[in-house]
Image: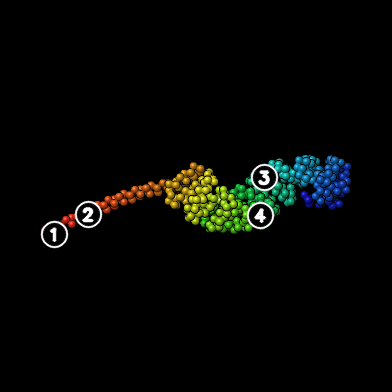
Amino acid sequence: MLRTYRKITSLSALLAVAVAITLAPVAVADFDQALDYWNRGKYVEAAAGFQEIVDQQPEYDYGWFLLGMSLLKMKKYDDSESSIQKAIDLNGERFEYHRGLASARYNAARYARTIAVLKTAESLATDASSQFSLYRLRGLSYIALEKWADAVPDLEKAMKIKKDPDVLARLSKSYYKLRHYDKALPVLRQALQADASSTSLLMRMTNTLLNLGAEATTATEKAGYFKEALTTAERLQAVKGNDREVTNLFGRAAFSAKSYPKAEQAFRKVIAQKPDHCYAMVNLGKVYIAMERWADADGILRDAATCAPKMAVVYESRGFALMKQKKLDEAVVQFKKALVLKPSASTRRMIETCTNNIQVASQNAAMAAREAEQAAAAEQAQAEYDEALAKTEKWEEARRRDD
């Protein structure tokens, strides 16, 4: 918009505007003064000037448009929309009028109506600059409505015209929300080239890499994604290391990259800052399991169960830690709690494994008891035999002495 205004401030353009008016001519000096107010950011004065012009010349569409844009800068969205609509009613062939109306509606959070006016104006956007502004604003409107799939085509078209940092960031978010992590990653790389310290972009990048790692089918691919996720999380920590969620995300990245000491330190830091941070407790429990610190895992997951009694993963993880400590009965209790919250074939298999091991242990214990009983009986019989033999030998010896 500002480029249009600069062009019209030239004397030749002003004269052309004046000549183009078929009713009573607008005084160039009045128009120039109002436009000067606009260019200096004095929107109240500019609006007053343009209002005076359209009062004198109600058929002057460009005056209505500039009045509406001045009101938009003053955040008077209803008045802005009304004025720009009058400009469109007088001359509906100028794209900038429709774009101005869309801007007024967008700023007033009327996103569906923003999209509607831009659809109407699409055929009027004949140059790259107009097309970029249309696709960008319509894409942002779809995002505001959380219509991610609708936002993508417009933002992709805008990006082909110009690698705008804001468009890149919004397109990456749309891909991420649609779980198109493979498409989000290259866009995020470009966006971070423009804004390397953006917290939101670094967080989205880290999460994208973690998700790609989880989806990868080979160990090499997984390791590559998780390694880059940790590197990105380290960059994020350098920007905003005191943020709990950033630290928790760093811990997740470290855990996925198998940097368990770093992960433990991160999750312990989060819990120290917020003792009831349930996710950090669960994540720390997973770290302890990976490190085969079964008792530590059981302890933190017990706390997590108090904090988040409806999280199935808490009971699944704690059950596994107990199973590894051969506390099978307690493990079954935990697995059954998990099964109630979230039916899972793997959890059922864990219960079956524990139950079978309990039965085997019971049978082994019974067998061991029987063997011990038999051994004791044999030992007692042997003792009785030895005692009888000793008595016999003693009697024989006594008899020989008597003889």
Q: Earlier in the sequence, mark 1 or mark 3?
A: 3
345 or 302, which is in the foreground?
302
Task: Determine the CA span between mark 1 and mark 3.
Answer: 117 Å
Q: Residue 238: horizontal and vertical position, in percent?
A: 63, 58
Residue designated by label 3: 144
Q: Quadrant of the C terminus?
A: bottom left
- C-alpha distance separating marks 1 and 4: 109 Å
Q: Are marks 4 and 3 in contact (CB under 8 Å)?
A: no
Q: Is residue 361 visible?
A: yes
Q: CA distance from mark 2 to mark 3?
A: 97 Å
User: On the picture, is 129 further left or further right than 400?
Assistant: right
Query: Percent position (x, y) of residue 151?
Result: 66, 46
Mark 3 residue crowding within 10 angstroms, few (<14) / some (14–19) / many (20+):
some
In primary-sequence order, the first of circles 2 and 3 is 3
Closer to the chain start, of discs 4 and 3, is 3
Type of amino acid under label 3: Ala
Disc 1 residue type (three-letter)? Arg
Q: Earlier in the sequence, mark 2 or mark 4?
A: 4
Mark 1 or 3, closer to the camera: 1
Q: Which residue is mark 1?
A: 401
Disc 2 marks a residue whose amino acid type is Glu
The answer to whether any part of residue 116 appears in the image is: no
Is residue 325 shown left or right of residue 182?
left
Residue under pointer 2 = 387
Of the two numbered discs 2 and 3 in the rendering, the one whose residue sits closer to the viewer: 2
52 or 142: nearer the viewer: 52
Q: Amino acid at mark 4?
A: Ser
The residue singled out by tag 4 in the image is 198
User: Helix, strand or loop at disc 1?
Assistant: helix
